[in-house]
Amino acid sequence: MGMISRRRFLKKAGIAIGAGVTSSLLPGSSGRSLAATKVSLALDFVILGRHAPFYVALQKGFWAERGLEVSISRGFGNVDTARRVGQKQVDFGFTDLPAVALLLAQGTPVVQVAMIYQNWPHTIFAKPEIRTPRDLEGRVFGTPPGTTGTQLMPAFAEVAGFDWSKVKVVNLDAATQNTALIGGKVDAISTFRFFVPFFRSRMPGVSLMAWSDYGWNMYSNGIVAHEEMLSQRGEVVRAFLEGALLGYKHAIANPEEAVAALLKHRPEVAADAAGAEQPFIKELAVSPDVVQRGLGYFTPSKVQFSFEMLYRYAELPRSVTAKQVVSEKFLPVVKP
């Protein structure tokens, strides 16, 4: 997207977004408004360009016209977000399937109701001399302690063929792990591939190792809710998902407008960095099955693969099944 000023995005927001644009309800929707229901959404980490679709849903009124007043807050790692949903501190969370499954095994009643990222997004970013995962042995690896990626690194190590016990792990805040690598405080980190442009512009020769290139590819981030939300407030779940998925649909088709919506609500976000992340949203959220079935769709074979990986490498008890963790009951059809 190139170097783009905040002023340009905000100008676009005022013209294309702030002009009171509305949309019709999805086919099959009830067509009646919920009575000003307040709901909350916790994201996975600090608010970044990848979260723009949710702010599109806010700005364009996709939630409001369905009677929802949605507040959005930052997260502190996937596991923490899923736990907050399970403890009813927030109504919905944007977090990943492994976090939901592993917490459900511990008795936390959370359910994944839409799968946004169809492809595993984690990539290891490292100093130039670290060319393969095996090169991490004997090096310093920085990671936020509450993340699913942290929990699954030993599993990834087994799949990728290196000894995780030989890696020195230090805890970092999610907001500072990137600068810790650039500043040389750690030798490597693992984070979403959204940061590829960021690191290439600031760390010449940065080494990139996508987990999926070493045999690890499973479902990742989606929308989660408390079990009671599904059983007692299903209409709210469906309305929330309709608004959120329409936000993704619009953001994928209109990336500059998506960034404008984000900046209007979160002016502290860097415009250039947010713009650079937009192409990756489509890369992660749209698959051949999604084109046919709609955003958020769960492909049965991939769900099963994801659970096999968790059973084998993350010590998920086999008593925890996909049927318990995943629900499409309230998932609307919103094709990209």
Image (cartoon, helix red, strand yellow):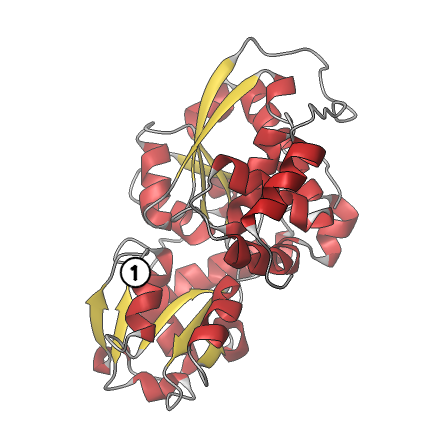
Does any portion of residue 115 appear in the rendered image?
Answer: no
Res 237 → quadrant: top right
Q: Position of residue 117 (x, y in %)?
A: 57, 53
Q: Residue furthest bottom?
A: 129
Along the horizontal axis of the image, is 223 left or right of 133?
right
Label 1, secondary structure: give it. Answer: loop
Q: Residue at x 32, y 47 (%)?
A: 76
Q: Residue at x 59, y 12 (%)?
A: 34
Of the pair 209 and 128, the residue shown nearer to us? 128
Q: Residue furthest top?
A: 35
Along the horizontal axis of the image, is 75 left or right of 50?
left
Res 245 → quadrant: top right
Of the pair 176 and 165, the residue shown nearer to us? 176
- Image quarter where the N terminus lies is bottom right
Crowd tier of the residue under label 1, counting other residues whose Cα lies within 10 Å: few below 14, some 14–19, many 20 or above: few
Q: Residue at x 63, y 44 (%)?
A: 258
Dot 1 amino acid type: Thr
Q: Position of residue 22 (x, y in %)?
A: 72, 24
| Number of dots carrying numbers | 1
- Residue corresponding to mark 1: 176
Q: Residue furthest front?
A: 7
Q: Is residue 20 above or below residue 186?
A: above
Q: Position of residue 88 (x, y in %)?
A: 34, 27
Res 80 → quadrant: top left
Of the pair 16 and 172, the residue shown nearer to us? 16
Q: Position of residue 94 (x, y in %)?
A: 46, 42
Q: Is residue 87 above or below residue 277?
A: above
Does any portion of residue 294 appear in the rendered image?
Answer: yes
